[in-house]
Amino acid sequence: MAEYYLDIETLSPGLKPDPVAEKIITIQYQRLSTRDGAVEGNLQILSEWGFGSEKSMLETFRKIFLTGNDWDFIPIGINLYGFDLLAILTRMNYHFNLNLGIEFLRSKPAIDLKPVIVMKNYGMFSGYSALRGKKESHKVKDWYETGNKTGNYQPIIDYVTREANEFLQLYQTLKREIPKIQSPTSI
């Protein structure tokens, strides 16, 4: 069993990102300890510009993500079911005709922390994204377009690295604190 932090960035032409219509430009993942969320490997950042195409980037990730054993890569992140996994499956289906769908999402183990973050935000969905490190996501499109002109994609790399570090702090805190919560003795 291997837990991995997982996040993606997409090229969002509109105000609200659409996981089934946008090109994936980065995929970030990092192996974590199942016990305490400690880092067990380097942050891997796959980029569309580094591989020359989204398809080549996804082909590399596909070998890591779809091994035939669902427990080899357990994604951990925020809003995985509402965005990241939908985008990954949609784009893999588009490029490789895999026909991955609801059954894959039902059988693939994943830890999506969105409900926990919403609870931390007093049950409100509005504003919860600020608690998950997505403060600059609206700038990714501009950074990408500038990178296409100049070859400098460093602002995106810096952003996804900061986002990963913020997630790791949150996840390690949750791994440490949630087990301390006492369950009611009578249910």
Image (cartoon, grey):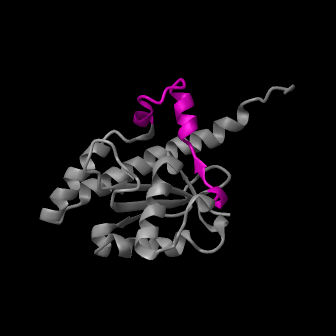
142 over 125 or under it: above or below:
below
Figure quadrant of the N terminus? bottom right
Boundaries of the magenta span:
106-131
Of residues 14 and 179, the one nearer the viewer is 14
In the picture, measured across the screen, residue 7 lies left or right of residue 182, that is: left
Q: In this orientation, which residue lies closer to the viewer: 17 or 160?
A: 17
The total of numbered circles placed on residues is 0
Give the residue displayed 65% in from the left and 66% down from the top: 70
State whether residue 43 appears in this view.
Answer: no
- Outermost residue toward the left in this view: 149
Query: Relative to residue 153, is residue 21 drawn left or right?
Result: right
Quadrant (top left, top right, bottom left, bottom right) of the C terminus: top right
Visible in this render: residue 37? yes
Relative to residue 146, is residue 59 drawn left or right? right
Identity of the residue drawn at 35% across and 56% down: 21
Q: Position of residue 93 (x, y in %)?
A: 46, 69
Q: Is residue 61 above or below residue 108?
A: below
Q: Residue at x 45, y 75 (%)?
A: 96
Q: Is residue 118 magenta?
A: yes
Name the residue rendered at 36%, 55% in the picture. 9
Q: Position of residue 149 (x, y in %)?
A: 12, 63
149 inside magenta stretch: no
Q: Residue 33 vs residue 58: left or right?
A: right
Q: Position of residue 32 (x, y in %)?
A: 58, 57
Q: Position of residue 85 (x, y in %)?
A: 50, 56
Q: Nearer the viewer, residue 149 or 45?
A: 149
